[in-house]
Image: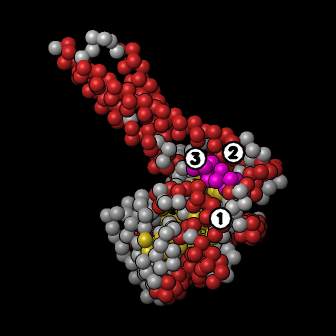
Amino acid sequence: MIAFVKLLIKLVKLALAVSLVFPAVYFRTPWLASLRDWAFGLVFMISLGLIVSEILGWTRNSSQRQVILSVFILAIASFSFSLAVTTEVKFQLTKQAILNREASQLETLGQHFIVGYRNLEEVKTLVKKGAIAGVFITRRNIQNKTPDEINQEIQSLQAIRDNQGLSPLWIATDQEGGIVSRLSPPLTQLPPLSSIIKDKKDIDSTKEDVIRYASIQGKELSEIGINLNFAPVVDLNYGVISSEDKYSKIYLRAISADKDIVAKVALWYCQTLADYGVTCTIKHFPGLGRVDTDTHLEDAQLKTSVAELTQADWVPFREVMSKTNAFTMLGHAQLIAVDPDHPVSFSQQVVTDIIRDKWQHNGILITDDFSMHAVYSSQDGLEAATVKAINAGVDLILMAYDTDLYYNAMNALLQAESANRLDITVLKSSNTRLKQAIRKIL
């Protein structure tokens, strides 16, 4: 009976050791960002406990079966422990290397990042270092706070910049209306923009309603200190519904299937937000309305020809780009006809050749969140993707969900700069665009 109990305990320990492998391997991936400290702590403590208990519990009287199980437990627990510790130490060294740099070394490249945060003091440190261009505010940052309290927190960040004599931070959010309303409550929960024009034959008759809608958002966002809104969605609504799409759900967020309606509504919306000092962001170029997978969780491909996209999906983008100071958000779908090897967000063939050179567009280009699978797990990886994006002419890299990714991305840019792998001409043009953009909201 005693032997059976001992064997059972060994088997439980083995199962526990095996269960630690997954968090040990993946605790630093973006989708575990909210549980990262817990995951690392559990792996560290439990694996160390298993190692110590097996070493101290070994006796010469142990049966061969028990010895074999002990070896497996030690091997697996040691693997998880060493992998987790090595990964964490490597990250912390990178983070400290960034934070220990002089602000003057970080400001030039730092102005190309907008980051989300879970810890206000950490993001304040980045602001003090001049290491970022802005912050992304979402639901986790405002829970149980009044608009005044949110504004005070934002102003505490802006005050740091003001005291340094630097331009204001971009304070960004995702307040589209409908299912993507990150600041509601306390801000007004509005339906999607599409609800305003639904079943209306004369789109021009809805202009005042669109302006009224945008005015509510613009006024409320401005009052709490937001100056950049990641809206409107100008992807065309092709009614694509897929079990593979967990988060994007463009069919619920798009304005219309009609390119001309989308162009008009988006233009009215952006012009109205600008009246309140809030810059809009049209998204998600090259258009996700036809895509049936979710770049949050997997790769996505857009196989439509450039000719067809030019006549349809790109019409709203071109219209708003040419008539406003809107930012354009680059999605992570691969535009197969142009560049089958890279997501659009860091594709030189798309960003440089089409948007910058062919279209001669000199507005701000911002990526969708680089925490998404389509970037983080791409064949290039986060670091190379960041360098490629900047060299292609992207102005801002967004890291909304997982702030920790910023340190690896910034380190990649600093290393590329030292190795002369950053295109200085492209970088200077981007820096000029960013300075001009922030002046327009002052």
Residue 435 is inside the magenta segment: no
Among numbered discs 2 and 1, the one appearing first in the sequence: 2
Q: Secondary structure at mark 1?
A: helix
Among numbered discs 1 and 3, the one appearing first in the sequence: 1
Label total for image: 3
Asked if one can make out residue 334 in the rendered structure from this viewpoint, the answer is: yes
Name the residue: 59% across, 83% down.
Answer: 319
Say which amino acid is labelled 1: Ile
Classify mark 3: residues with Cα within 10 Å, few (<14), some (14-19) or many (20+): many
Can you name the residue that lies furthest to the left here? 1
The chosen color scheme is secondary structure
Tell me where the magenta segment starts and ends, as one range: 405-415
Q: Are marks 2 and 3 in contact (CB under 8 Å)?
A: no
Where residue 103 appears, as percent x and y from the top left, is 78, 48
Say which amino acid is labelled 3: Asp
Q: Which residue is mark 2?
A: 98
Compare residues 240 and 351 and report the one nearer the observer.
351
Q: Secondary structure at mark 3?
A: loop
Left or right: 157 as drawn, with respect to 116:
right
Query: Residue 120 occupies which quadrant of the picture?
Result: top right
Where residue 88 appears, as percent x and y from the top left, is 54, 38
Q: Which residue is mark 1?
A: 390
125, above or below 274, in the image: above
Q: Quadrant of the N terminus?
A: top left
Say which amino acid is labelled 2: Ile
Name the residue: 71% across, 49% down.
Answer: 127
- Magenta span: chief secondary structure: helix
Q: Which residue is mark 3?
A: 404
394, above or below 4, in the image: below
Compare residues 314 and 65 and report the one nearer the observer.
65
